[in-house]
Image: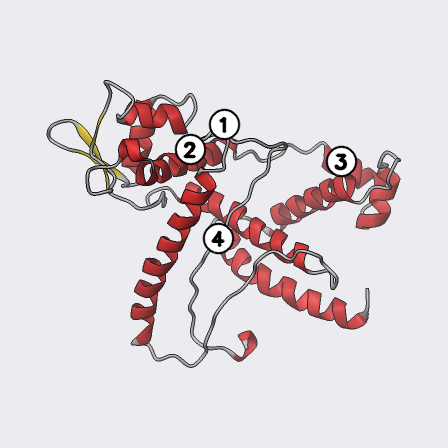
Amino acid sequence: MGAEISQVLCAAVIRILRPLVVILLRHGVSYGTFSELTKRVYVDVAFQEFGITGRKQSTSRVSIITGLSRKEVMRVRKLPRPIDREGAERYNRATRVISAWRQEGDFLDKNGEPGALPLSGGPATFSGLVRRFSGDIPARAMLDELKRVGAVEETEDGRIRLLARAHIPKGSEADKIHILGTDVGHLISTIDHNLPPQVQEPFFQRKVTYDNLPDQVLPKFRKLTVRKAQALLEKMATWLAGHDRDTNPAVPGTGRNRAGVGIYYFEAPYSEEDA
């Protein structure tokens, strides 16, 4: 690695780590714990992505690549892996249900808005919605989850009304931290894909930012961002749902892939370090 690239990369890593360390310290995660997690990822990535074609990756080669001793590599590989499968499933299933409720004709009212659905009694019900778009999770469990995050309410006549345009965890900090892992990971993966100078098909990666905005402008821009970005994401969700085999089993093709678009808002007082 050239000296200039090394210096720029180290500066970039510090920028990434600063807000992450704020979160870690706030939740009592010590440097020692973070160091163990980092070692685990270094070893995993070295084994999975930096092998020699046609040869099984070895502990010795991983030791050379990572700078860890062979003994440390073997120790780290035996560490238990933190699992967040339950949080991921809960978030993904709730997201699919809300998205389908806003898009699928069976669950819309005469004005094209998400209908107030009876709990059960046919396909055009909340139970039918959950069965079609959330796999084998019971409708009552999904209802409890959506109530928990403030996405739905039960009316006096027993119907379920959608209140949210998207699944946004409100009460559970654990769910929000799960999103930290997935969304930031996706963004860094996109940047990694775009890094090679001669990349043939770069992934879309853009942002717009100005650095001399008065305080009074920010609330207006926040509202504009929510309105415009949500409309774009819903349009993208409709297109993807029509091509996803979970929601449309008749879609032809091979392989199984994940694709999506993420939008985020940021603001902070101006700092020369961030210029």
Q: Nearer the viewer, residue 199 or 42?
A: 199
Query: Which residue is disc 4 drawn over?
Result: 262
Q: Secondary structure at mark 3?
A: helix
Gap in angstroms between the C-alphas marked 4 and 1: 27 Å
Across and down, in percent, residue 214 comes to: 35, 80
Q: Nearer the viewer, mark 4 or mark 3?
A: 4
Q: Nearer the viewer, residue 241 or 116?
A: 241
Gap in angstroms between the C-alphas marked 3 and 1: 47 Å
Query: Which residue is disc 1 drawn over?
Result: 250
Query: Which residue is disc 3 drawn over?
Result: 75
Q: Nearer the viewer, residue 68 or 163?
A: 163
Q: Amino acid at mark 4?
A: Gly
Q: Residues within 10 Å of mark 2 (few under 14, many from 20)?
A: some
Q: Nearer the viewer, mark 4 or mark 1?
A: 1
Gap in angstroms between the C-alphas marked 2 and 1: 20 Å
Q: Amino acid at mark 2?
A: Arg
Residue at horizontal 23 percent and vertical 24 percent from the top: 119
Q: Is residue 54 left or right of residue 208?
A: right
Residue at horizontal 57 percent and vertical 54 percent from the top: 187
Query: Which residue is disc 2 drawn over?
Result: 93
